[in-house]
Image (cartoon, rainbow, N blue to C red):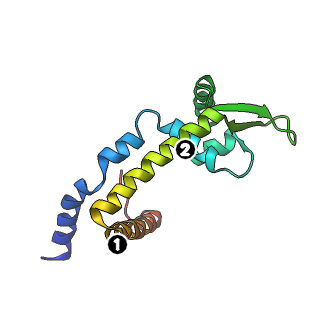
Amino acid sequence: MNKRQHAIDILERSVPCVPKLFFDKLNKHEKGVDFALRYLYNSEEETNAGDLARALDVSTARVAILLDKMEKKGLIYRYSSKADARKTIIVLSKKGRDLELKKREAIIRIVERLIDDLGLEKLESFVNTSLEINTSLKEILEEGKIEIE
């Protein structure tokens, strides 16, 4: 089999490799909220709407809508920055922090089950290989010689 045939074979066999059900559950309609919860939970510095917009790669207008939604649900609160009154700082509420911790625990339990089912070595190999593939794909696409439209 030549390289082209191997490439076609790999593409066809790789479609079911993405753990779609798992990621669909993670990314359901609330994916912006989930990302913002994770981002705010992990943030060690004051976070404003601009920071979140850059991290999500969306407009600040879209983030404003997201933050309004989160505030109405009691997941965050906002206050004016002491350093720059023009900036509004976003902080997780206790409810938001608890929700993020609950989601993290559920995901940890899933990965623990994967370790039981597949073994640590296989799972580590999968993650390491996936990271290498992502790095290589990023380099290939950034070269600009091959485009996917």
The residue lying furthest to the bottom in this view is 2
* Residue type beneath disc 1: Glu
Could you tell me which residue is drawn at 33 percent across and 58 percent down? 114
Tell me where residue 83 sits by quadrant.
Answer: top right
* Residue type beneath disc 2: Leu
The residue lying furthest to the left in this view is 1
Helix, strand or loop at mark 1: helix
Using the rendered image of the protein, determine whether residue 39 is visible from the camera's viewpoint: yes
* Residue closer to the observer: 133 or 46: 46
List x then y, in percent, for residue 3.
20, 75
**Height in image: 124 above or below 28?**
below
Q: Which mark is residue 101?
A: 2
Q: What residue is shown with label 1? A: 121
Helix, strand or loop at mark 2: helix
Horizontal placement of 90 versus 34: left or right? Answer: right
**Height in image: 123 above or below 97?**
below
Q: Residues within 10 Å of mark 2 (few under 14, many from 20)?
A: some
The residue lying furthest to the top in this view is 72
**Height in image: 130 above or below 92?**
below
Q: What is the spatial separation of the Cα atoms under label 1 and label 2, in whole angstroms?
A: 27 Å
List x then y, in percent, for residue 18.
30, 54
Tell me where residue 28 sits by quadrant.
Answer: top left
